[in-house]
Amino acid sequence: MISNKDIRLSVFFPAYYDEKNIDKVVHKAVEVLEELQLKDYEITIIEDGSPDKTGEVADKLADLYPKVNVIHHEKNKGYGATLWEGFTTAKFEYVFYTDGDNQFDLEELKKFVALVPFSDMVVGYRKRKQYSPYRKLTSFVYNYLLRWTFDTDYIDIDCAFKIIKTDLFKKINVNTKDAFIDAEIMIRAGLLGYTFTELGVKHLPRIDGVSTAARPSIIFRTIREIFELKKELKQEILERRNKK
């Protein structure tokens, strides 16, 4: 059985407009990771071209903690591209991410690490989403659409609190570098037979910073990408059948 002393964990936080959040997130992450007594860990802040002082705060954290490093984007690349960079640059066997907006309690990471020996992915779901009624509606419709389109079993597919085996990202590529990326990764992982355990997490209201999610342009682009992926996967199935 794998114990904490066998686990090496890469942790990353996408951060945009999070100058008042990212320090709280990283301080708590270091505290929790030290208490877990893992074999090794790394923390990466991916600062996505924030116009505020997120980058400056991130650099100070990297100076304070030897296991923290920062990736700076000169221009904003978007959430999906930032996530993909975090997953594909992780150097350890497992990768954990959550957003830099301090909407999750990192103390719950301890429960997720405890489940690592039992599946390839430990996937969070928000027990009570701290969103506006509009955001709750779009989230419900989004998850329902994905379950209907791809026959997925995830409760909350784009919850930003997950541990994943890093080798997945050597086996897949994704078409989107936008908001749909989290769901596409989970769908492709399922097709490869990656097992998962779901665990409820407390979702906290965003106190500081700016959220760019659920803009109409992002929603329409995501819908288009859902059906493009469905078409691609259908074609892949037909090609496999023709080879038999």
Image: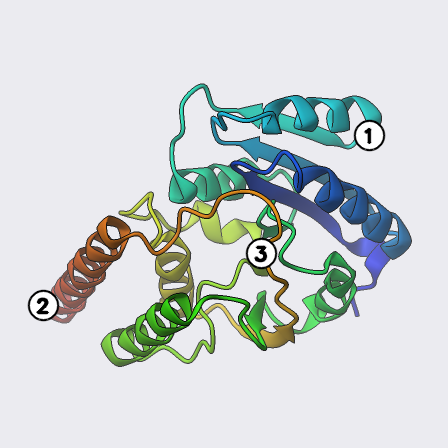
**Amino acid type assigned to the residue bearing label 3 in the image:** Lys
| Dot placed on the residue nearer the N-terminal end, 1 or 2 | 1
- Between 55 and 241, the residue placed more toward the observer is 55
Which disc number belongs to residue 65?
Answer: 1
Q: Position of residue 185 (x, y in %)?
A: 40, 57
Task: Give the alpha-carbon distance from disc 2 to disc 3, as whole Å.
Answer: 32 Å
Could you tell me if residue 192 is visible in this image? Answer: no
Examine the image and state in which quarter residue 108 appears.
bottom right
How many C-alpha atoms fall within 10 Å of the one at disc 2: few (<14), some, or many (≥20)? Answer: few
Examine the image and state in which quarter residue 120 appears.
bottom right
Q: Position of residue 195 (x, y in %)?
A: 52, 72
Closer to us: mark 2 or mark 3? Answer: 3
Which disc number belongs to residue 210?
Answer: none
**What residue do we see at 24% from left, 54% from top?**
216
**What residue do we see at 33% from left, 43% from top?**
177
Give the residue pinned by disc 3: 165
